Image (tube, coloured by chain):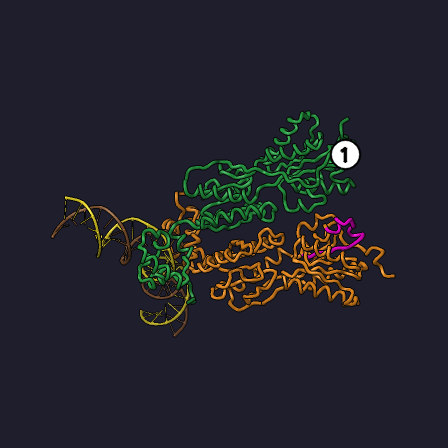
Chain colours: A orange, B green, C yellow, D brown
Amino acid sequence: MSSSSPATIEDVARIAQVSIATVSRAIHTPEKVANSTRLKVNQAIAITGYTTNAMARSLRLGRSNMILVVAPDIGDPNFSNILVGLENEARAHGYGILIGHTQNDPQRGLEYLKFLNSNQAAGLILFTGILPFGHQSMTARLPPSVGVFEPVYNGGIPYVGVDDIEGARKAVDLLIAEGHRKIAFIGDSRTRLAYSRRRQGYDAGLDAAGVPVGDRIILEGDGTIESGRLALEQLFMRDTLPSAFMCVNDQTAIGVMIGLGARGYDIPTDFSVTGFDDVPQASFMTPSLTTIRQPRTAIGKSAMALLFELLSNNEPAETEILLRPDLIVRNSVSAPARRFVRR
Amino acid sequence: MSSSSPATIEDVARIAQVSIATVSRAIHTPEKVANSTRLKVNQAIAITGYTTNAMARSLRLGRSNMILVVAPDIGDPNFSNILVGLENEARAHGYGILIGHTQNDPQRGLEYLKFLNSNQAAGLILFTGILPFGHQSMTARLPPSVGVFEPVYNGGIPYVGVDDIEGARKAVDLLIAEGHRKIAFIGDSRTRLAYSRRRQGYDAGLDAAGVPVGDRIILEGDGTIESGRLALEQLFMRDTLPSAFMCVNDQTAIGVMIGLGARGYDIPTDFSVTGFDDVPQASFMTPSLTTIRQPRTAIGKSAMALLFELLSNNEPAETEILLRPDLIVRNSVSAPARRFVRR
DNA sequence: ACGATCTATGTAAAGGTTTACATCATGGGA
DNA sequence: TCCCATGATGTAAACCTTTACATAGATCGT
């Protein structure tokens, strides 16, 4: 049955003794075809093993059934689970996904722009907080697009993320409940919106607990493990230490933990640490890291669903969807060491 | 300049005052076009911002410029760096890659088979050790394909991997050099070939060191963290303990380390542990894990290069390419505890 | 019984590209 | 000077699909 080249719609039509138009209708709008005919067509399809040629279909339709997902770093531990969500939802709509990897290189971004321009993708999911296409982006005709994690600054594109304020609030509330008053916040100037919102949650929590602004310690890193460690070193040069470190993300928290370990401190006996994201490593640290989990699969699913909304109604859908993050309690937080407890 | 719909080859032809055939030639076979004409065409392309419509091109050519990469688990820490290698090499040939995620579900595999059948991919990279398409795979017309990590059992497909024997040998030689004689090997029955080869390296190393077969301890897991832990528990029920654990992969090693930590042992003072793969977590463990690094980016690059060889010459290229793994010395190995040292 | 409406199907064009073949001009060899 | 080879370009078909429009048969109301 399987000939050298794949069966076309004409092969099916010949066997079913109908026209190719009828075959196409039997597949895509079966209700427009008589029952008996549909049966014949289905049999012919089974015999030939016909699958519609996606390229011809896309060419005719002027759009593909692929969604392009552009991420700066595929290896990012946050990425893969999101991808699962994106993928499942896309497939549920009969679409496939195509992953692009920019590595923050505008040159690479441009290649994907070419890609989009040649109609090879019906939609775009962006992981970067910025259109990674350089200046041409302005003139380019972008397909319906959705951002993930962060709004896209130069694009006016709806996005799906997590409620950073609420997440940070959960972390700080836990620390407060354990008895901490002096809590350092180690930030990350790169991911600006996430940073400011998590910071906002931190401040709100301390406000609610009545911790005076003067007791708050803010440090800036860049979100990497190394920067967490560096921030810690800076802190140790000051005279007053916090009893807990609330970190803007897990990487930073890991850096802090490594730094504290190197100085011979025990976590959580001497210091408590929290992160944000719940990357896989978080559970393998010693001690395991108490953090805020991003509902990654849900974010992916939600982003893709939003994209399909855009693809069907052209109306601009909701511009921001924030999912609720969960507090994951592990072993890096306990009551403050005695020396910190207020008498 | 940017009209509502993307420029076609006809727009370019009109502006350059040539036929569309000449435009096509100017792009793909410039040597067949007069210099002056080529210049006009290039200007017209610049003016219109023309990019060739990939779908029309693929339809005409009967093949796409996409390579499908099928992996059982995109979140696998081994995956992302390989992907970078695959991606770079593909792009160097003017191809893009498409990632498919089977999650070991044959149903999903079939969807990708449909994909291949509709000519949407010119080639296939397989991460599973088995064609994930169920029984239809036999009748299906697969495009040129290459396996990664493992040979594809039911496919006769060339593959690129790492020299597992040599890698395991490096690990065992390190342990021997540190003075260990009683070394347990914790295996993984899932990835059969990798397992048996790493085991082979283990045996060869012990043979060379003159360690009698009776002193070798072999345990079976399934390659997960949990199974490493379980294997450890089994071992503790026996009377003779090893002084070192050589694990078939990092996940297993992490499980062993967690288990040893839970029993209150210190690594490497009480026991040494080695892994294989060098997943990102390996460097963040406490202590950091001594392991064998897979040259992941190189594997990806090499696999894609092999695929393009297949795509150009149809001759069957080399059937197995093994890259050399590196020993990464970290802190989970030291000389055996005194009680193990032979007097 | 006849026109109107509806349902099922067929015909043919269009989508953008590549390329075999045809055409035409040029230049060189005889 | 004439013919032929060569090089540059154009014409048109083909890749496979979807769908507007046309056609034809059936059903229904009067």
Which SS does the magenta portion mostly show? loop
Residue A275 within the magenta-colored segment of the rendering: yes
Q: Residues within 10 Å of mark 1 (few under 14, many from 20)?
A: some
Query: How far from the left and from the top, in percent, is residue B32?
Result: 32, 51
Q: Is residue A120 above or below residue B141?
A: below
Decide if residue A242 is on the left or right side of residue A155. right
Q: Quadrant of the C terminus of chain A?
A: bottom right
Q: Quadrant of residue B285?
A: top right
Q: Residue at x 52, y 39 (%)?
A: B160
Q: Nearer the viewer, residue A264 or A165?
A: A264
User: What residue is disc 1 on?
Assistant: B337
Q: Is residue A243 in view from this perspective?
A: yes
Mark 1 is on which residue type?
Ala
Q: Nearer the viewer, residue B275 or A266?
A: A266
Q: Secondary structure at mark 1?
A: loop
Q: Quadrant of the N terminus of chain A?
A: top left
Residue B181 within the magenta-colored segment of the rendering: no
Query: How far from the left and from the top, in percent, is residue A312?
Result: 51, 64
Residue extent of the magenta highlight: A259-276
Decide if residue A122 is on the left or right side of residue B252. left
Query: How far from the left and from the top, in percent, is residue B13?
Result: 34, 61
Most extreme residue toward the front is A237
Query: How far from the left and from the top, in percent, is residue A69?
Result: 54, 56
